[in-house]
Image (cartoon, grey):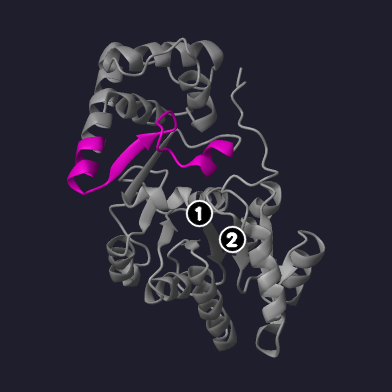
Amino acid sequence: MNEAACIVALQLIDGVGHKTINKIIYSPSYVLSDGYKSFYSCYEAIKSITRKIPELENDQLEAIYEESIEILNNQEKLGISTISCLEKNYPVGLTFLPTPPPLIHFKGNLDALNQKNVAVVGSRKMSPGTRNKIRELTAELVQREYNIVSGLAMGVDTVAHHSTIENKGKTVAVMAHGLEIITPRSNSTLASKIIENNGCLLSEHTIGTIPSKANYVTRNRLQVAVSNGVIIGEAHLTSGTIETARQAHYQKKHLACLPLTEENQSNYTAIAYLVNDLKANVLDSSQSRLSFYNIIKDTTPNGPTAYSKQLDLF
């Protein structure tokens, strides 16, 4: 609790982000288990390396630390667990991000994130043909013992989660807000089923964090990081789904997309971008799907060509 409370307290200070926190907590010079004393030492260290944070008095720092304890206690009451990037069960794939989340919060089976995963994401509005293809793909992936990672949004995400559960597989929903809420509300029952079926709800945000466009964009990197490969359903060129595809390309993950059909002609520019610029495999036949499954089957979540963990942060 002390370690997590220290990190949450640092996150509550204006101007302190993941990168700054990681500079401190990865340093052997700082111990995070001494409660308020550790938090105060980390605050002083951060002040010495950045001018972006405010000058705070002792009583203000104590109030921030107490707030962090209250947040974690309230999360525990809601069945939300928290681990830091320094703990052994922190998902391996996340450690290969340039800036891993210092803390992650979850409900359900965290071990699912260290197993074989494929992210399946796409548009909130999709054609009937795409719906059928997503159901077919997820069934095939579950048969090959992959977990399905998505974001619990309407459309492709919802179909991917539902189909995985129907086929007795495990699925992970990566959220862009605190886990005390479910968005959309209509997927509250689905969220419960994910946990009941040995899956996981995951977020880098504490309770009290509301959904925002910025949080959805940064969330995408986590979906990719814990996955062996990424499959894009329908998407428009300016959508968040394309940002997920860019993350797959950046993280050197295997990327695939569904083909252009008469039903989704409006996605022509997006599919062309995925194939020509991001080098996505087009899953337009049983043979192309099999080839993609063979490409990813021996890939760990961090990927055979993923960049090295950034421990030299200073």
Q: Are marks 2 and 1 in contact (CB under 8 Å)?
A: yes
For mark 2, give the secondary structure: helix
What's the CA distance linking mark 2 and mark 1?
A: 8 Å
**Res. 240 mark:** 2
Quadrant for the C terminus, please.
top right
Q: Residues within 10 Å of mark 2 (few under 14, many from 20)?
A: some
**Res. 121 mark:** none
Whether residue 237 is visible here, answered yes or no, is no
What x and y, as percent, mark residue 38?
34, 14
Whether residue 282 is visible here, answered yes or no, is yes
User: 194 or 177: nearer the eye?
Assistant: 194
**Res. 216 mark:** 1
Residue 95 among magenta residues? yes
Who comes first in sequence, dot 2 or dot 1? 1
User: 246 or 286: nearer the eye?
Assistant: 286
Q: Residue at x 34, y 17 (%)?
A: 39
What x and y, as percent, mark residue 226?
52, 49
Residue 277 among magenta residues? no
- Furthest residue toward right: 276
The amino acid type of the residue labelled 2 equals Gly
Question: For this view, does 270 lie left or right of residue 209?
Answer: right
Residue 259: quarter of image: bottom right
Quadrant for the N terminus, please.
top left
What x and y, as percent, mark residue 189?
28, 70
Q: Which segment did they paint magenta?
A: 72-96
For mark 1, give the secondary structure: helix
